[in-house]
Image (cartoon, rainbow, N blue to C red):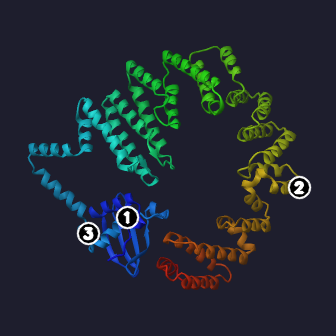
Amino acid sequence: MLKPWTHFFKSHILNRGWDYYETGSVTSLSKTETGYRATVEGSNDYDVEIEVCDNEVVDMYCDCPYAEDGNFCKHMAAVLYQIEAGHNPPELPKNNLYDLKTELKDVISGIDESELRHMLLQLALKDNTLQNHILINYAEQISPSQMSRMSHEVEMIARQHSDRTGYVDYYQAMAYVQDMDQFLCENVQSLIDKNLLMQAFELTNVVFHTIGNQDIDDSDGGITYVANSCYECWKEILDRATEEERNQMYCWFNEHRRNYVFDYLEDYVSDFLLNEFHDPALLLKQMQIIDEQIEHATESTGFERVYFSYYGYESAILKRLQIMKELNYSSDEISKYRQRFRHFSAIRELEIQEHLDCKEYEKAIEVLKESKELDNEYAGLVSKYSNQLIHIYQSTGQKEEYKKELIFQVFSCRQDDLQNVKLLKEQCDADEWCSFRQQIINAKSCLGIIYSFLEFEEQYDMLLQMIVDSGSVYLLDMYEKVLKRKYPDTVRDIYAKFIRRYAATASNRKAYQALMPYMKKIRKYPGGEDLANQIAQEWKSVYRRKPAMMDELRKAGF
């Protein structure tokens, strides 16, 4: 009997592990030299290893994403429940799926049609998903009660993937997103295909409202993925809608621009309202809405004013200009309106692009220089204007201005690659470049490219020293190829120092596995074979009570 192990797991992980155990998902459970090994079947199959010493769980491994981030997962819990049960779940015979399908097909073909219909009815009454599938795909009309049931199914998806407080954690987020998107694809699309457009619109809004108010760890951006799917459904519904239905949709979007979903998703409602309705009467209504937004932004103060000015405000002005063109306003009216808001960068960018399209390069240069001054607090904009000037000066053969702007760009704007540095070098003689090179090494604007710059300039001594000072083995990995040719012993010893330090804090199989490529790497250096074996012997002595680490050393050939 294993000593108590449930303390390793969060309560909801234990519950899910029990579900996997109860449904017989644990297969191929077998004893190993250090514990147990099994496979847990589900949407994917995952291999689990449990390390046991004196009936105590000392380490666990699973190749699922949750466990690979250093967590104890539901698959581990399922295997531990299975170990405690003292037996393997009954294994189905090989080719069981094919045999079962054939057998079912033969039996079903002999069942009376009326009995089959009765059986299907009984199953559908017990299965909400099957109910919805039948009613959506085969009913001529969708009743209010059926719409209510489908809305309830959306709520159930949210409950299924959230904890008691309604929170969807990172490891449930992807399944939550997939289920919501699948619901849209299957149910809403079926309604659209049957031309039940307002029901499809209503159901899309239920999904959008649910995801837009869900407490979720959305680190991977899954919510925006579903929101985009909702947007596409809206577009397809609008394309097929009658004039009356389009007006209904317009009213809905207008009424739900604020406080319907989290603020970052409100843009989907506003964008749809501003971008998808093109009827003249609706365009005039949109202009009225935009004018109200701009007036609200003008009257705002503090943080709200800053937010509107540089996020909602500019896009609203640009959209109004677009609508004015669609409604055939005169060029003078448009120009006059644009002049009112010329202090916004987006408006000046329109001017710049128009000048470039007409090959009015001097006018474009004038506006770009002006914009560098007006927007000097915004480094990203200044860098953008500078790069545009560089391109214009280069294409128009203004060599002196071209070089001056390159110098400004390299030393005053953050550099993310070597492109501008290389262009500047082409404009310099050897002595001038030698001076610039030292300035680049010390420039704050070039911190992000310093390592690649030193490699480009073949300053390998300085590159190695900076990597050593940084203490980052990952930087050494990036530049190992060029450094090991000149400093093989130093690079080898840096790797050895790193893995010795890392081994002292490693506490799970994933961490031990991460060490082994470096052990193999060290072997390939001069004198590395002896050094790697020496480190392995040290670990076998110091960490002998870590069976997973010993196992990884053995697998790596030590």
Q: Quadrant of residue 324?
A: top right
Q: Are marks 3 and 1 in contact (CB under 8 Å)?
A: no
The location of residue 252, given as percent across then percent down, is 43, 25
Question: In this rendering, is residue 378 above or below 362?
Answer: below
Identify which amino acid the numbered label 3 is placed on.
Pro
Q: Quadrant of the N terminus?
A: bottom left
Residue visible at 85% across and 42% down in the picture: 404
Which numbered tag is attached to residue 89? 3
Q: Quadrant of the C terminus?
A: bottom right
Identify which amino acid the numbered label 1 is placed on.
His
Residue 136 is left or right of residue 469, and the answer is left
Residue under label 2, please give it: 435
Residue under label 1, please give it: 75
In terms of sequence position, does the residue under pointer 2 or pointer 1 come before the other? Answer: 1
The location of residue 437, given as percent across then percent down, is 84, 56
Residue 151 is left or right of residue 223, and the answer is left
The location of residue 131, given as percent across then percent down, is 23, 41
